[in-house]
Amino acid sequence: MSVGRARVVVGITGATGAVYALRLLQRLKAAGRETHLVVSPAGVLNAHHELGLDRKALEALADVAYNPADVGAAIASGSFATDAMIVAPCSMKTLASVANGLSDNLLTRAADVTLKERRRLVLMVRETPLNLAHLRNMTAVTEMGGVIFPPLPAFYHRPQTIDELIDDTVERVLALIGVESAAPKAWSGL
């Protein structure tokens, strides 16, 4: 665990679902977490397409933002204490890089560091249908201690808006990384 204010690394890649990253950054801030953001070039393109946000606007949502090419940044070292890392959304390319230990940019290096330090890594993978390579990469990351968390909505609480679906998924992820104020809607039985 980090000393002082809890730190969470957030990665954004080029898969669809940039709204999950946006909401995560907002909720982490509200929960008093220090956020460290790294956005891939494809992540910026996707956030612009889906949300109308550019790199500067995304980076303004975090406490600290890094260039994905800066493999010497603080989050590239296990000596930089963090509590967790979430990649939201996580492309299949990023999943494959993490599964195979390819630390070829800061985002994948930070994920590798998270795993080697036995910290919580959550990959919100986005792709359907899945092919065998995707499934094998998910298995590999799971075997290394990572959590594969496709942002699949729950309908048992009868959401009325897209925002409710997004919020419920985000709250579940926050609960996974130990954010005390997380409030996922629990199934209470029939």
Image: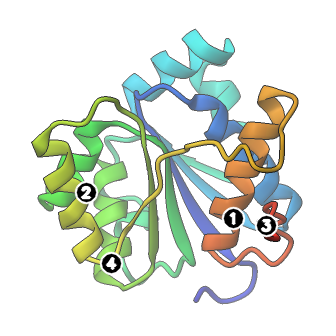
Label 2 crowd (10 A; few <14 / some 14-19 / many >=20): many
N-term mark: 3 or 1: 1
Query: Element at badge 1?
Result: helix
| Residue 139 or residue 187, whichever sits in front | 187
- Inter-mark Cα distance, 3 to 4: 24 Å
- Against 2, residue 185 (above or below) is above
Can residue 28 be seen?
yes
Mark 2 touches mark 1? (CB < 8 Å): no
Q: Residue at x 69, y 64 (%)?
A: 174
Label 1 crowd (10 A; few <14 / some 14-19 / many >=20): many
Label 3 crowd (10 A; few <14 / some 14-19 / many >=20): few
The residue type indicated by label 2 comes to Met
What x and y, as percent, mark residue 123?
Answer: 43, 54
Mark 2 touches mark 3? (CB < 8 Å): no
- Inter-mark Cα distance, 2 to 3: 26 Å
Question: Residue under circle 4?
Answer: 145
- Side (left or right) of 51 relative to 65: right
Q: Residue 129's mark?
A: none
Question: Residue under circle 1?
Answer: 174
Query: Element at badge 2?
Result: helix
Query: Element at badge 4?
Result: loop
Can residue 104 be seen?
no
N-term mark: 4 or 2: 2
Q: Nearer the observer, disc 3 or disc 1? A: 3
N-term mark: 2 or 3: 2
The residue type indicated by label 3 comes to Ala
Question: Residue under circle 2?
Answer: 138
N-term mark: 4 or 1: 4
Question: Residue under circle 3?
Answer: 186
- Side (left or right) of 149 relative to 154: left
Q: Nearer the observer, disc 3 or disc 4? A: 3
The residue type indicated by label 1 comes to Leu
